[in-house]
Image: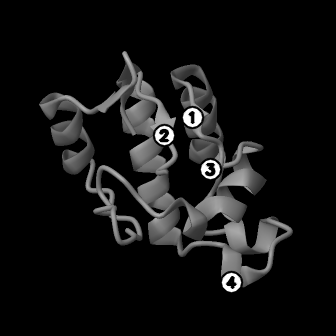
């Protein structure tokens, strides 16, 4: 996540604070903390099914993040397993869905993009 300018991937201290204060806690990988970054592979199929966007894209611009946040907000965490045509193993728990919603909403509200780790 961050703002891309002059090839830099940067979150301001205010962005980091807003994300941390959201209370979102997602699965992190070797190079992610689960707060300001997360392991997209874990959530890819769910996010794609709900938003129509892949987390495997190198860059998701702020306007796309807004659309994704809106679609995640519309997804009921408590009924997602019954409503989505996915193997249950690929649907995060209701708490993880709530955390995805929080994270994407903060990013959307702050005009942030999503950047794939490379």
Dot 2: few (<14), some (14–19), or many (≥20) neighbours within 10 Å?
some
Please identify, in this view, whether the residue under mark 2 or under mark 4 is nearer the observer: 2
Q: Nearer the viewer, residue 69 or 40?
A: 40
Q: Nearer the viewer, residue 29 or 67?
A: 29
Q: Residue 79 appears in which quarter of the rendering?
A: bottom right
Q: Are marks 2 and 3 in contact (CB under 8 Å)?
A: no
Query: Please, what secondary structure does the residue beneath circle 4 have?
Result: helix
- Reply above or below: 68 against 94: above
Query: Please, what secondary structure does the residue beneath circle 1 have?
Result: strand
Which residue sits furthest bottom? 89
Q: Nearer the viewer, residue 97 or 39?
A: 39
The CA span between labels 4 and 3 is: 18 Å
User: Circle 4 sits on which residue?
Assistant: 89
The CA span between labels 4 and 1 is: 26 Å
Give the image location of residue 99, x and y in percent: 42, 58
The CA span between labels 1 and 3 is: 9 Å
Q: Is residue 77 visible?
A: no
Q: Earlier in the sequence, mark 2 or mark 1?
A: 1
Give the image location of residue 26, x and y in percent: 39, 65
Q: Are marks 1 and 3 in contact (CB under 8 Å)?
A: no
Query: Please, what secondary structure does the residue beneath circle 2 have?
Result: strand
The CA span between labels 2 and 3 is: 9 Å
- Reply above or below: 40 against 58: below
Q: Are marks 2 and 1 in contact (CB under 8 Å)?
A: yes
Q: Which mark is residue 59?
A: 1
Q: Is residue 80 left or right of residue 116?
A: right
Q: Earlier in the sequence, mark 4 or mark 3?
A: 3
Q: Is residue 13 visible?
A: yes
User: Circle 3 sits on which residue?
Assistant: 55
Please identify, in this view, whether the residue under mark 4 or under mark 3 is nearer the observer: 3
- Reply above or below: 94 against 102: below
User: Circle 2 sits on which residue?
Assistant: 115
């Amino acid at each position: 996540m961050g703002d891309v300018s002059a090839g830099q991937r940067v979150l301001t201290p205010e962005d980091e604070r807003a994300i941390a204060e959201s209370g979102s806690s997602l699965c992190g990988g070797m190079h992610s903390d689960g707060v300001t970054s997360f392991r997209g592979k874990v959530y890819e199929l769910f996010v794609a099914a709900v938003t129509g966007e892949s987390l495997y894209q190198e860059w998701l611009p702020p306007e796309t993040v807004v659309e994704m946040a809106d679609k995640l907000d519309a997804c009921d965490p408590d009924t997602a397993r019954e409503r989505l045509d996915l193997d249950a193993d690929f649907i995060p728990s209701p708490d993880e869905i709530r955390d995805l919603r929080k994270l994407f909403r903060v990013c959307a509200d702050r005009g942030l993009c999503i950047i794939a780790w490379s």
